[in-house]
Amino acid sequence: MSILDQEDPEPPHIKEEREGLWTSQEAKQLQGLEEADDTKFPPVSVHLKTEEDEDTSLDQEARDLHHMKEEKEELWTSQEDCDLHHMKKEEEELWTSQEAEQLQGLEEADDTKFLSTGYNCKEHMSLKKHIRVHTGEKPFGCDCGKRFSQLWHLKRHMRVHTGEKPFNCGVCGKRFTTQSDRRKHMRIHTGERPYICGECGKRFAQQGNLKSHMRVHTGEKPVICGECGKRFSKGHLKNHMRVHTGERAFICGECGKRFVQKENLKNHMRVHTGETPFGCDACGKRFTTLAGLKNHMRVHTGEKRFSCCECKKKCTTQAAFKSHLKVHTGEKPFCCDDCGKRFATQGNLKSHIKVHTGEKPFGCDACGKRFIIQGKLRIHMRVHTGEKPFVCDACGKGFISKWTLKLHKRVHTGEKPFVSVASHIKRSQFQGREALSR
């Protein structure tokens, strides 16, 4: 009998303990799988081996594990589909079939091409949109030819054509195409001016206004007029071109008068409304425009910026200077239809026409005397007030008008530009006798 045959057979109680240990280890392995996925997967019942089904236990365990794996894979696939569906749902709702076809040409490789820029895109579609910044792609097109990189940019642009203005100001009721425009508009009411010039400290409500202002310091005028060669900032060239085209796109609804610029129409409307928002701190006089106030302030400061190179006369305003130059050129472009008399300025023509109509719209409150032009009334009022603002440098005598001062000065200069009728007759007679003696 061999040594192997002499060995005692394995006692039954040891065999049972070993089988119990195997069963316990297998149960622990399966329990670990269940605990790892206890929030995602339903509990799986495990058939523990007994002596009766020992021969089929391994096959049953294999089937159970395979079944668990299939259920897990199905759940993972379902979860991934759900996540992708959630990520793309809003984007896919916005796409039309045409837009989807335009986007099909994007390669998957482009999704990771620009990751080195450091831009953190949490979702696939956000990355896809961001990539267009680098590629310059604009897949969304309007019928007017303009193209956009984002669908919502196109939708916002379409309001230009439809006239839709969904955002309104809660203070004045004005409506706007975009929320950004409304936010900018609100600064008119709040007085907020967040943009500051680093050179002079001037503040602005809009960033574009600050950029335009900076050109005052830099002297930059990047755009050139093709007609006259004059240089402008970008926004001003469009207004300037109307000088050459004669276009007057802005019309007054009250009187039908047309204007080159919208700002000019806005100022003109104050003629009808009587609004005079700009006041002089020195004398209290009020004006419809800021430019009118600035010109008026030179009366108090004595500043005369515009000088005539022909006669050295100085003028307070550019308009007065241009009118004065016509004295030297002899230009009189404005003609009276009634008598044919011509004038250098339109204002002088309008005043002259009142001679024919007999209109005297300006009346004195003190004596009732009426005048054709407001300037004459203003001079007349000094008769009642005793004001004599024009003073002779030679003798200190004061006068109510510049014209009367000019006449007075001839007393000191001896100038006699006007010849009397009697003097003219005597001179003619003397010249006649002199001719006969010859």
Image (spheres, rainbow, N blue to C red):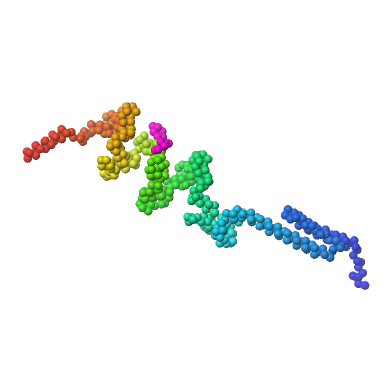
Residue 228: image location, x then y, percent: 35, 51
Can residue 249 be seen by looking at this rendering? Answer: yes
Comparing 129 with 26, the one in front is: 129
In the rendered image, the residue lying farthest to the left is 437
Q: Is residue 97 above or below residue 412?
A: below
Rendering quarter of residue 258: top left
In the rendered image, the residue lying farthest to the bottom is 1
On-image quarter of the N terminus: bottom right
Q: Is residue 178 rendered to the left or right of residue 264?
A: right
Can residue 103 be seen by looking at this rendering? Answer: no
Q: Is residue 186 rendered to the left or right of residue 24?
A: left
Comparing 39 with 74, the one in front is: 74
- Residue at the image point whose x is 77% and y is 55% from the top: 43
Rendering quarter of residue 425: top left
Main SS, magenta residues: loop
- Residue at the image point whose x is 54% and y is 57% from the top: 132
Q: Is residue 8 rendered to the left or right of residue 395?
A: right
Comparing 274 with 305, the one in front is: 274
Residue extent of the magenta highlight: 271-286
